[in-house]
Amino acid sequence: MSTEKYDPQAERWTETAYADADAYLAHRAELVVSLGPRLAPGDVVLDLACGDGGLGEHLLGLGLEYRGVDASEPMVEAARHRLGDRVGSGDLNTYEPAEPVAATTVFRAIYYADDREAFFRRVAAFTTTKLVFDLNPRQFPLETVRAELRRAGWDGVALRPFLFPQRHSPPRALRPLVVAAERTPLARLALRLRFTYLVVAFRGSNR
């Protein structure tokens, strides 16, 4: 996985990538915990392609243990400034933790998997509760990804349209309405034009 695109952006990546990083990542972190099988305080989350670790701060704030991995050394260095030795180097296509984790997350990076189905199968070998990632349905057909997950051993899938904008911050008073809209049929219509799904894959025993 080439990191040339991201290396120069490592400094202040989170602050510049999102119009309101705290609000955006807080919502994402809450869904990592609550969508699909619920995570419990103390559960370990492995964040592949973690960037500068911005999501890690929010997951730690929810009582989870956090491990971040990124292939970009400048990103790893920036993440270590935030999170210390919770972050290390590794490519999402090859990295495997020394011990199983409760959840594995991959945000804004699933398209870097060399073989998506093989990636899903490898993650299943070390993830006990769920895999969480974002998916652009206009780029990757949802049913194709569902089939890949099933063949890789993930027989359960939970979906949530993620409508919180990355580049524009909605007024604070409207944010609860944006989040509430994610649970309505209108959200799937919005996905035809923009936004992404948050996908949670799990096994039947975790339903």
Image: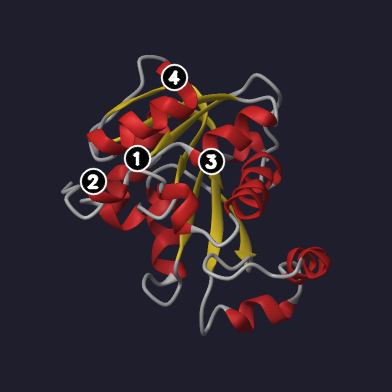
User: Residue 197, located in which quarter of the rendered image?
Assistant: bottom right
Residue 94 image point, x, y percent: 23, 33
3D distance between C-alphas at marks 2 and 1: 29 Å
Of residues 24 and 38, the one nearer the viewer is: 24
User: Residue flagged by tag 3: what amino acid is it?
Assistant: Leu
Whether residue 130 is visible, yes or no, is: no
* Camera-nearest label, 2 or 3: 2
Give whichever of discs 2 and 4 has the lower sequence position: 2
3D distance between C-alphas at marks 4 and 3: 14 Å
Secondary structure under tag 2 reads helix
Q: 10 Å neighbourhood of mark 4: few (<14), some, or many (≥20)?
A: few
User: Residue flagged by tag 1: what amino acid is it?
Assistant: Arg
Give whichever of discs 4 and 3 has the lower sequence position: 3
Compared to residue 23, the image places residue 76 above or below, namely: above
3D distance between C-alphas at marks 2 and 4: 19 Å
Of residues 126 and 189, the one nearer the viewer is: 189
3D distance between C-alphas at marks 2 and 3: 18 Å
Whether residue 59 is visible, yes or no, is: yes
User: Residue flagged by tag 2: what amino acid is it?
Assistant: Asp
* Camera-nearest label, 2 or 1: 2
Q: 10 Å neighbourhood of mark 1: few (<14), some, or many (≥20)?
A: some
- Is disc 2 in contact with disc 3, using a CB cutoff of under 8 Å? no
Q: Which mark is residue 7?
A: 2
Compared to residue 169, the image places residue 206 above or below, namely: above
* Camera-nearest label, 3 or 1: 3
Q: Residue at x 45, y 56 (%)?
A: 16
Secondary structure under tag 1 reads helix
| Pointer 1 residue | 121
| Pointer 3 residue | 55
3D distance between C-alphas at marks 3 and 1: 24 Å
Residue 51 image point, x, y percent: 38, 42
Secondary structure under tag 3 reads helix
